[in-house]
Image (tube, rainbow, N blue to C red):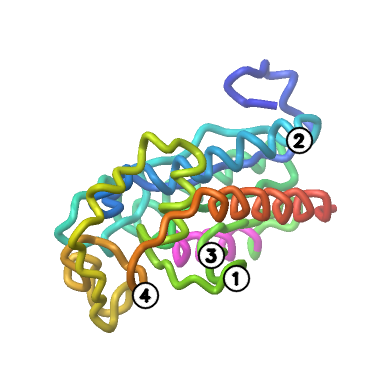
């Protein structure tokens, strides 16, 4: 069930699913909404599969992306994001006994852990679960795509080929400086904003399709496992 299409009496007894992405640079060839596009595709499909269980919330786009340094991004600070999510989830806890955040952006990971701990350790009746697609490329395919690399490019190619500007990948420097996402930003680590540790980005639509299907299968099983 889709929240925006539901009446006040429809929502009870469902599990809220809240997709969280980002609006940030994804190299010269991918859209700034890449993370959001990916989680929305996954969320849309899982809602159709489990419409009797899931209450699909609108995607949260403006999140935490300060790790991109001088490259364009549109979001908020860590403190603001923690406060915003905590207030939102506390509001949900008045009407539901659990909720799932579906995360598609690595910059949100540390924040979501704090929010999850804060909510769950102080609330015995309601529980917050996090399902993240971050790192699944390494788990599924052993591909070290940290940002705008082979996996993300392949997924967007599968979802909407018109959004991938492959011609922009000519003459790209794929070198990545040590310490990215830890002590230096994306703009300091690579001049093009691509963090693909295996070198050249290889776009494979079938890999993108397999990624989406495997994530959906994992999320489906995860949701059914919740008590």
The image shows residue 81 at horizontal and vertical percentages of 39, 52
Asked whether 21 or 139 is in front, the reply is 139
Per the image, the residue denoted by label 4 is: 197
Q: Would residue 111 be counted in the magenta stretch? A: yes
SS class of the residue under badge 1? helix
Q: Which residue sits at x=56%, y=57%?
A: 133
Q: Position of residue 31 (x, y in %)?
A: 32, 42
**Towards the viewer: 23 or 116:** 23
The CA span between labels 4 and 3 is 12 Å
Q: Which numbered disc, 4 or 2, marks the residue closer to the eye?
A: 4
What whole-number distance in Å separates the C-alpha atoms at marks 1 and 4? 15 Å
Spatial CA distance of label 3 from label 2 is: 23 Å
Q: SS for tag 4?
A: loop
First reached walking from the N terminus: tag 4 or tag 2? 2
**Residue position for label 1:** 139
- Disc 3 on helix, strand or loop? helix
Please say if the residues under marks 3 and 1 sit with CB atoms less than 8 Å apart. yes
The residue singled out by tag 2 in the image is 49
The residue stretch that appears in magenta? 108-120
User: Which residue ends up furthest to the bottom in the rendered image?
Assistant: 178
Q: Most prominent secondary structure in the magenta stretch?
A: helix
Looking at the figure, which quarter contains the N terminus? top right
Residue drawn at point x = 46 percent, y = 52 percent:
154
Dot 4: few (<14), some (14–19), or many (≥20) neighbours within 10 Å?
Answer: some
Q: Find residue 165 and name its label.
A: none
């Amino acid at each position: 069930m889709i929240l925006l299409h539901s009446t006040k009496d429809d929502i009870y007894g469902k599990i809220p699913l809240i997709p969280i992405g980002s609006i940030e640079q994804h190299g010269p060839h991918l859209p700034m909404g890449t993370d959001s596009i990916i989680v929305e595709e996954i969320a849309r499909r899982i809602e159709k599969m489990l419409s009797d269980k899931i209450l699909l919330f609108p995607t949260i786009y403006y999140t935490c992306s300060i790790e991109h340094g001088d490259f364009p991004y549109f979001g908020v600070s860590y403190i603001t994001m923690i406060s915003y999510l905590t207030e939102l989830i506390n509001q949900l806890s008045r009407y539901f006994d659990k909720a799932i955040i579906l995360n598609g952006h690595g910059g949100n990971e540390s924040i979501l852990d704090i929010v999850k701990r804060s909510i769950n350790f102080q609330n015995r009746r309601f529980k917050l679960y996090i399902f993240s697609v971050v790192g699944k490329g390494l788990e599924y395919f052993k591909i070290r795509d940290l940002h705008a690399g082979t996996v993300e490019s392949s997924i967007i190619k599968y979802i909407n080929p018109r959004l991938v500007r492959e011609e922009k990948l000519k003459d790209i420097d794929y070198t990545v400086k040590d310490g990215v996402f830890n002590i230096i930003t994306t703009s300091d680590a690579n001049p093009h904003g691509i963090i693909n540790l295996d070198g050249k980005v290889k776009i494979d639509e079938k890999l993108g399709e397999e990624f989406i299907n495997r994530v959906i299968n994992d999320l489906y099983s995860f949701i059914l496992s919740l008590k």
